[in-house]
């Protein structure tokens, strides 16, 4: 079981940390350009983004892939 997680670059990271680090790196405007979802383009906040991403698997996957591409 732990072998599977060793290969997961997101292991141990919370969604909140992922979104916070991406926002700090890119800012909301650029983040909204990279991933065109309303939680990043229309009155963005960490709280509203987390609420949306937790309910929307396809959007969460895009955010996770950007995090891996940026920091991985």
Image: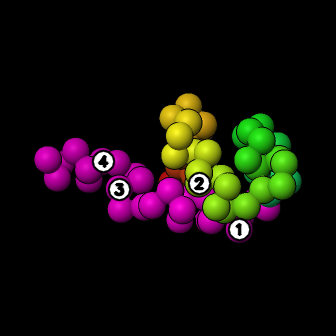
In the image as oriented, which residue stretches furthest toward the top? 58
Q: Nearer the viewer, mark 1 or mark 2?
A: 2
Tag 4, which secondary structure?
loop
Q: Estimate the spatial distance between the alpha carbons at disc 3 and disc 2, rounded to whole Å.
A: 18 Å
Q: Nearer the viewer, mark 4 or mark 3?
A: 3
* Crowd tier of the residue under label 1, counting other residues whose Cα lies within 10 Å: few below 14, some 14–19, many 20 or above: few
Of the image marks 3 and 1, the number of the one nearer the N terminus: 3
Q: Estimate the spatial distance between the alpha carbons at disc 3 and disc 1, rounded to whole Å.
A: 20 Å
Q: Residue at x 58, y 45 (%)?
A: 53
Q: Residue at x 78, y 56 (%)?
A: 44
Relative to residue 57, is residue 62 drawn left or right? right
Name the residue carrying label 2. Answer: 50
Relative to residue 35, is residue 14 drawn left or right? left
Tag 3, which secondary structure?
loop
Name the residue carrying label 4. Answer: 7
Name the residue carrying label 1. Answer: 24
Q: Residue at x 59, y 54 (%)?
A: 50
Tag 1, which secondary structure?
helix
Q: Estimate the spatial distance between the alpha carbons at disc 4 and disc 3, rounded to whole Å.
A: 8 Å
* Crowd tier of the residue under label 4, counting other residues whose Cα lies within 10 Å: few below 14, some 14–19, many 20 or above: few
Name the residue carrying label 3. Answer: 11
Q: Which region shows up in magenta?
A: 1-27
Closer to the camera in the image, 7 or 34: 34
Q: Is there CB contact under 8 Å for labels 3 and 1?
A: no
**Horizontal and vertical percent position of residue 11:** 35, 56
Of the image marks 1 and 2, the number of the one nearer the N terminus: 1
Closer to the camera in the image, 28 or 49: 49
Residue 35 in magenta?
Answer: no
**Horizontal and vertical percent position of residue 61:** 53, 38
**Horizontal and vertical percent position of residue 70:** 61, 53
């Amino acid at each position: 079981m732990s072998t599977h997680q060793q290969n997961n670059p997101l292991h141990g990271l919370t969604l909140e940390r992922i979104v916070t680090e991406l926002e700090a790196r890119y800012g909301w405007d650029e983040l909204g350009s990279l991933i065109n979802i309303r939680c990043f383009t229309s009155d963005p906040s960490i709280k509203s983004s987390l609420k949306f991403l937790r309910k929307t698997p396809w959007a969460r996957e895009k955010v996770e892939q950007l995090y891996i591409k940026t920091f991985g």
